[in-house]
Amino acid sequence: MSEAFSRPAAGQVPVLRLGNVLPVTLPGDLHDGMAHRLRQDLSEAVVRGGVTGVVIDISGVEIVDSFLGRVLAELAAQAGLPAARTVVAGMRPAVAITLVELGLTLPGLRTAPTTEAALELLGRTAAPPRAGRGREGSP
Amino acid sequence: MDTAAGVEARLPIRSDMDLVWVRQHVRHAAAKLGFSLVDQTKLVTAASELARNTLVHGGGGQMETAQVTTGGNGGLRLTFSDSGPGIPDLDRALSDGYTSGGGLGMGLGGARRLVHDFTVETVPGSGTSVRVTSWVSRPPRLREDV
């Protein structure tokens, strides 16, 4: 019974790279182990350098409880270290309403209605480091 | 009423994957009973908090769901029980910001705000049972908070 067999790569959230931004789409029902793994993967990707922003799309996420809230806050704090910014995109209205009643304020977390808006926000607020080097096409 | 079939259940809470099943079941049951999307989301969020407490603090346990009715109004009752160490100071555990598990400390108090009825029975050394009920349309009640 290998650990690799019981935990296939399908249970992993892929961290993509789009220019200097890492877009991540959270699945509808993220279990705790996947969240921990994602935190590690993102941190490794940011440490590798050249990342100015992280966009976490949660439009498919049906609930944000205090665990996932903490994961998001930690991802933001972690990505903040090497001058990368984190934007959480696409929070559903029902999720936002519930977060308020739950009492979670998620300080320091930037939000945008869509991933596209999040990319624009990052483009506007973070000075693009050395543009025009063909960064968009290949890493 | 034929809705009880997809509502009544007893689910184990032994791993973080079980939390996923708990959330899915509560979502389906609440949808079946006619909860609005926002009310479904609140109840599923509360269930997630409570199930995680059962797992992390209670050492595992179970959730039972039941359809309840009062005065023609339908509701969903969730009971989370464990045989863990119990909660030594319930008032403190219900206050925001208190945590013994490394979380944000919003779990129990936060879950209480997301449901209509909330009761905790805890016996130090022998376990905790948290029972919450939400109604499809909120019964008239004075809002003391806010």
Image: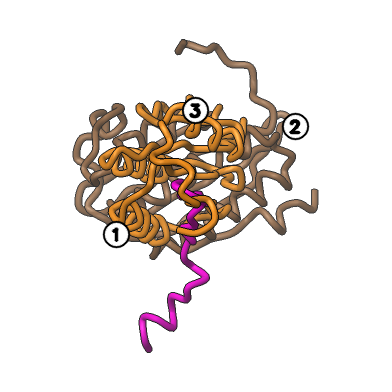
Position of residue B146 relative to residue A62, above or below, is: above
Q: Would residue B89 appear left or right of A46 to someone viewing this image? A: left
Q: Quadrant of residue B16?
A: bottom left
Disc number placed over residue B117 in the picture, else none: none
Question: What amino acid is labelled 3 in the image?
Answer: Arg
Q: CA distance from mark 3 to mark 1?
A: 47 Å
Q: Which chain is orange?
A: A
Please check the rendered image and state whether residue A3 is part of the magenta-colored stretch, yes or no. Answer: yes
Question: What amino acid is labelled 2 in the image?
Answer: Gly
Q: Are circles 1 and 2 on residues that touch, CB within 8 Å?
A: no
Residue A8: x %, y % from top left: 47, 76
Question: What amino acid is labelled 1 in the image?
Answer: Gly
- Magenta-colored span: A1-24
Dot 3: element: helix
Q: Which residue is mark 3?
A: A124
Disc number placed over residue B59 in the picture, else none: 1
Residue B76: x %, y % from top left: 61, 42
Residue drawn at the location 46% of the way across and 36% of the way down: A87
Mark 1 crowd level (few <14, some 14–19, many ≥20, 10 Å Cα): some
Q: CA distance from mark 3 to mark 2?
A: 55 Å
Mark 3 crowd level (few <14, some 14–19, many ≥20, 10 Å Cα): few
State which mark lies toward you, 1 or 2.
Answer: 1
Tell me, yes or no, if residue B82 can be seen here.
no
